[in-house]
């Protein structure tokens, strides 16, 4: 299905580096989403976010859309639009690469002496017909995306803490 990689003996140094980079990316995005979830929780429960959207968003795309809408519609958040909307735009741009890696299937082991990996991600459609999206990535690309996600996490965490601070008094 996703090649014989599932049955391979993963002791090749290139494999270890790729798997470590993917794990690092996954952890970085978990931290980023944790920061966004904290902000969403505060906005939804304490700042009338439920008037913008009844249900709390679960998926990353909906979280970003929800936060953008809240910062445009909720009076207490409007003064912070110039800082938060560009941050949300940065996060939205990074989402596609994250999806490709996290939801992609590695199709072949890295060639010896290279860190390039061939992956395929299935793009789903409502009619059940899926399209294959081929992806070529390197361990360096994945590690760079992880570093960028950590930087976004720091910014998102600062914004979440700023929202929480008045509530802690």
Image: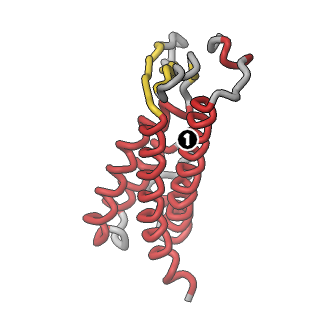
Q: Is residue 40 left or right of residue 89?
A: right
Residue 102 in percent (x, y) is at 56, 34
Q: Residues within 10 Å of mark 1 (few under 14, many from 20)?
A: many
* Frontmost residue, 25 versus 131: 25
Q: Residue at x 49, y 83 (%)?
A: 166
Q: Residue at x 43, y 69 (%)?
A: 159
Residue 17 in percent (x, y) is at 58, 37
The relative height of residue 39 versus residue 97 in the rendered view (above or below) is: below
* Residue 38 appears in the picture as rendered: yes
Residue most extreme to the left: 82
* Residue 55 appears in the picture as rendered: no
Q: Which residue is mark 1?
A: 21
Residue most extreme to the front: 113
Q: Residue at x 63, y 35 (%)?
A: 16
Q: Where the C terminus falls, by quadrant?
A: bottom right
Residue 14 in percent (x, y) is at 57, 30
Q: Residue at x 48, y 29 (%)?
A: 115
């Amino acid at each position: 299905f996703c090649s014989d990689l599932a049955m391979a003996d993963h002791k090749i140094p290139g494999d270890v580096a790729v798997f470590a980079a993917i794990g690092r990316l996954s952890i970085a995005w978990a931290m980023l989403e944790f920061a966004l979830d904290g902000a969403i929780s505060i906005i939804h429960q304490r700042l009338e976010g439920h008037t913008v959207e009844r249900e709390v968003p679960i998926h990353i795309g909906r979280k970003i859309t929800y936060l953008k809408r809240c910062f445009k519609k909720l009076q207490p958040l409007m003064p912070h639009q110039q800082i938060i909307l560009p941050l949300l735009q940065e996060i939205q741009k990074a989402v596609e690469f994250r999806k490709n890696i996290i939801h992609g299937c590695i199709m072949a082991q890295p060639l010896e002496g290279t860190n390039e990996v061939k992956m395929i991600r299935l793009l789903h459609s409502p009619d059940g017909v899926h399209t294959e999206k081929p992806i070529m990535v390197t361990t360096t690309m994945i590690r760079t995306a992880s570093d960028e996600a950590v930087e976004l996490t720091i910014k998102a965490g600062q914004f979440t803490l700023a929202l929480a601070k008045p509530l802690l008094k």
